[in-house]
């Protein structure tokens, strides 16, 4: 189903309100909505709520053969799905632009920043490594899926425990959860994405846009940071003058 | 790769360039007669080809038509022989889709789409040889192709990649530098107004190093803008001689 278009008067109302530094839900320009994180019963299951946006992440693992180019490293695989229950605009159409964008951002944020030690996932070099798969489902879309997904992914990865393995000569035994305690993954740091939306060619900046604000924004800047360093990501759409005053906003977070 | 020195003690890079030096740029416009606009660019060893069709009626699904502006359709692909190892690249894979999306966003910001409501502009880019800076070469080639097609554009869109090695920002990275140094920033700039069309960064970078890398990338984009301007003017001169003006 195509998304219901936003009426011109609603668009003007939102933009006018942003010019006067007012947001629909009464937040300040640099305020986040309430973030709630709950865990499921299994290891590696996590639900994150940012305001009304709800995202579920589940981590699972299996033993596979490693990639030829990296025989001693485990594999980290991310899959984000926009289920139709999240918004009437999401169809089961696989190639939607938003899906590709979110998936790639998530991969870049979590895989390229090397937040998980993949070398410790190796069992038998060149033959068997752990493949850690993170499945993220968007349950309700009220804006800013990226931040919710990144928080859910890294939290689920920190919560996850993989089965213990024993190697005796050539034999590899995977112990069940009852036999031996499962082992957590080694997480080096936790990168979290922060989204900034731009309005009126960069004059106004808002953090954590809700769904309505996302519809009228000119551009989006997503920065993935941990508490020590930065990993940036994408900035999309329109042009804007990134002035010094605005770049100070990045240091606020 | 261990032992590969990206920046020597004297301040020279792997291919002998200084940190703020760009690779040699050679470009040609109007190479295909069938397409509305086409361009070919070589930045060092990276070779990219761009072709523009349009503005024309929206093909495929009519629902994509926008009533007040043109739809921009970009497709990015790499030739199978473009990298050291031959790899079959299916069109729909995530990386190509992401690049196509980035190109689309970059050009939506630059092209005056309001002048062509209910139409579509196609931009097809192919990398013939990949040696780092794929996105930048694509954007530069596409800019020249769009100008060759006569589509009104706000300003040249110049793109350049930048990295950070041993406290020095490097500009216009080659493949070894991209994979070796970790950090790679790709910046697409509209030079006259200093406006950023797209900014993207891979891997990690400390917050304090961000400003020098951005500055280096913006300066490089401006110099690239002057090079592209020279190419366009020269092409116009040749064409006007041929048509006898």
Image (cartoon, coloured by chain):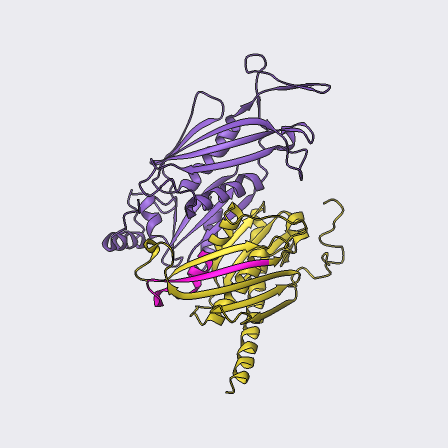
Q: How many labels does the image show?
A: 0
The chain that appears yellow in the image is: B
The chain that appears purple in the image is: A
* Residue B231 seen: yes
Residue B125 within the segment the image draws in magenta: yes
Q: Is residue A25 above or below residue A236?
A: above
Residue projecting furthest to the left: A9
Quarter of the image for residue B108 reads bottom left
Using residue A96 as the reference point, say whether residue B12 is left or right of it.
right
Q: What stretch is highlighted in magenta?
A: B104-127
Along the line of sight, which residue is nearer the eye, A94 or A21?
A94
Q: In this view, does B9 lie above or below B182?
A: below
The residue under the point 52% across, 83% down is B240
The residue under the point 57% across, 26% down is A62
Along the line of sight, which residue is nearer the eye, B199 or B67?
B67
In the rendering, at what x and y percent does residue A82 appear?
Answer: 40, 38
Residue projecting furthest to the bottom: B245
């Amino acid at each position: 189903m195509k998304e219901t278009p936003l009426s011109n008067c609603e668009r003007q109302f939102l933009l006018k309100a942003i010019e006067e530094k007012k947001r629909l839900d009464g937040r300040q320009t640099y305020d986040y909505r309430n973030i709630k994180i709950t865990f499921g019963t299994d290891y590696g299951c996590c639900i994150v709520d940012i305001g009304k946006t709800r995202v579920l992440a589940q981590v699972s693992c299996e033993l596979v053969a490693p990639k030829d180019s990296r025989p001693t490293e485990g594999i980290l695989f991310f899959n984000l799905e926009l289920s139709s229950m999240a918004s009437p605009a999401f169809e089961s159409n696989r190639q939607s632009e938003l899906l590709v964008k979110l998936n790639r951002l998530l991969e870049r944020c979590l895989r390229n920043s090397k937040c998980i030690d993949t070398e410790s996932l190796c069992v038998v070099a060149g033959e068997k490594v752990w493949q850690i798969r993170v499945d993220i489902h968007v349950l309700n879309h009220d804006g800013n899926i990226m931040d919710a997904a990144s928080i859910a992914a890294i939290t689920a990865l920190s919560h996850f425990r993989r089965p213990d393995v024993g190697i005796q000569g050539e034999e590899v035994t995977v112990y069940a959860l009852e036999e031996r305690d499962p082992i957590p993954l080694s997480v080096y740091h936790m990168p979290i994405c922060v989204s900034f939306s731009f309005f009126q060619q960069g004059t106004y900046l808002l953090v954590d846009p809700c769904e309505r604000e996302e519809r009228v924004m000119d551009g989006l800047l997503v920065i993935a940071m941990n508490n020590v360093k930065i990993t940036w990501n994408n900035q999309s759409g329109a042009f804007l003058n990134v002035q010094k005053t605005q770049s100070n906003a990045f240091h606020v977070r | 790769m261990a032992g590969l020195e990206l920046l020597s003690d004297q301040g020279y890079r792997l291919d002998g360039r200084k940190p703020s030096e760009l690779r040699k740029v050679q470009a040609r416009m109007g190479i295909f007669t069938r397409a509305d606009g086409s361009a070919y660019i070589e930045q060092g060893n990276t070779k990219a080809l761009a072709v523009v069709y349009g503005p024309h009626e929206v093909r495929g699904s009519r629902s994509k038509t926008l009533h007040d502006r043109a739809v921009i359709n970009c497709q990015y692909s790499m030739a199978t022989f473009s990298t050291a190892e031959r790899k079959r690249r299916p069109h729909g894979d995530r990386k190509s889709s992401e690049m196509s999306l980035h190109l689309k966003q970059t050009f939506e910001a630059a092209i005056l789409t309001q002048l062509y409501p209910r139409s579509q502009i196609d931009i097809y880019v192919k990398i013939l040889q990949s040696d780092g800076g794929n996105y930048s070469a694509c954007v530069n080639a596409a800019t020249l192709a769009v100008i060759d097609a006569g589509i009104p554009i706000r300003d040249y869109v110049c793109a350049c990649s930048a990295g950070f090695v041993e406290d020095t920002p490097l500009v216009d990275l080659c493949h070894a530098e991209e994979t070796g140094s970790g950090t790679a920033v790709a910046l697409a700039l509209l030079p006259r107004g200093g406006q950023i069309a797209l900014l993207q960064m891979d891997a990690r970078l400390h917050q304090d190093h961000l400003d020098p890398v951005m500055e280096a990338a913006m300066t490089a984009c401006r110099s690239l803008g002057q090079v592209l301007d020279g190419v366009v003017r020269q092409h116009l001169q040749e064409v006007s001689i041929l048509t006898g003006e």
